[in-house]
Image (cartoon, coloured by chain):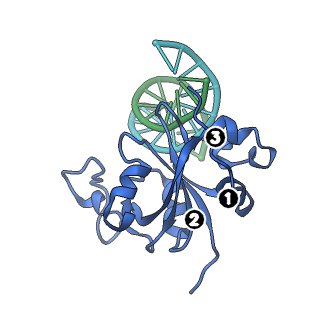
Chain colours: A blue, B cyan, C green
Amino acid sequence: MAGQQRYWLFKTEPAEFSIADLAAQPGGSGRWDGIRNYQARNNLRDLAAAGDGVLIYHSSCKQPGIAGIAEVCSAPYPDPAQFDPDSPYFDPKSSPDQPRWYSVDICHTRTLPGIISPARLKAIPDLADMVLFRQGRLSIQPVSEKEWNIIVAMEPQRTES
DNA sequence: GCCAACGTTGGC
DNA sequence: GCCAACGTTGGC
């Protein structure tokens, strides 16, 4: 039952849902929904499991980068939004019998005191091969154990401005 | 606002 | 199944 421990990077636009929004949820736990890309879906549905580590990455914003740490705290399950005609994530081609899209719940672990920018990550040789740099658009991407260990140990850096 | 990367769509 | 057109992502 205990599968392999995995690590992930989840991207979010902080204007939509930020690490602070996650921390503010009851119990610091919330649903990661609205994934509408097949590769991201496959990662989530087939590989994600409770206990996996998650780097929360803010994208398309003034200060992009890693903003916090979370943990997967549910098994993957069909994203309810795909069945809701009023949701922007509604998918008329999906059905409860044959759900197309999946969600997991994640639990807030900690919010970093500053954002770790992609430039700073890229400057570290052991991080240069992150999926983030090879396939920047993928919104649910795997992180190696080595990459995870480096990043969670990184000291916060004052945000220059 | 620009532009590169890349996923999706649709005609054939 | 190919591939051009198009739309979206996302850093800068």
Quarter of the image with the N terminus of chain A is bottom right
Q: Do the residues indicated by labels 3 and 2 lie within the same chain of the protein?
A: yes
Cβ–Cβ under 8 Å for marks 2 and 1:
yes
Read off the residue under disc 1: A148
Graded by Cα atoms within 10 Å as few (under 14), some (14 to 19) or many (20 or more), the crowding at tag 3 reads few
Amino acid type shown at disc 3: Gln
Amino acid type shown at disc 2: Gly
Read off the residue under disc 3: A157
Picture coordinates of residue C1 (x, y %)?
59, 47
Q: Residue reaching furthest left? A: A86
- Kindly identify the residue that appears in the image at 34 percent across and 63 percent down: A79
- Kindly identify the residue that appears in the image at 63 percent across and 40 percent down: A157
A158 left or right of A14? right
Q: How far, Cα to Cα, is label 2 from label 1?
A: 8 Å
Q: Do the residues indicated by labels 2 and 1 lie within the same chain of the protein?
A: yes
> Which numbered tag is attached to residue A53?
2
Q: How far, Cα to Cα, is label 3 from label 2?
A: 22 Å
A57 left or right of B9? right
For numbered disc 3, what is the local secondary structure?
loop
Among the 4 quarters of the image, the one containing residue A16: top left
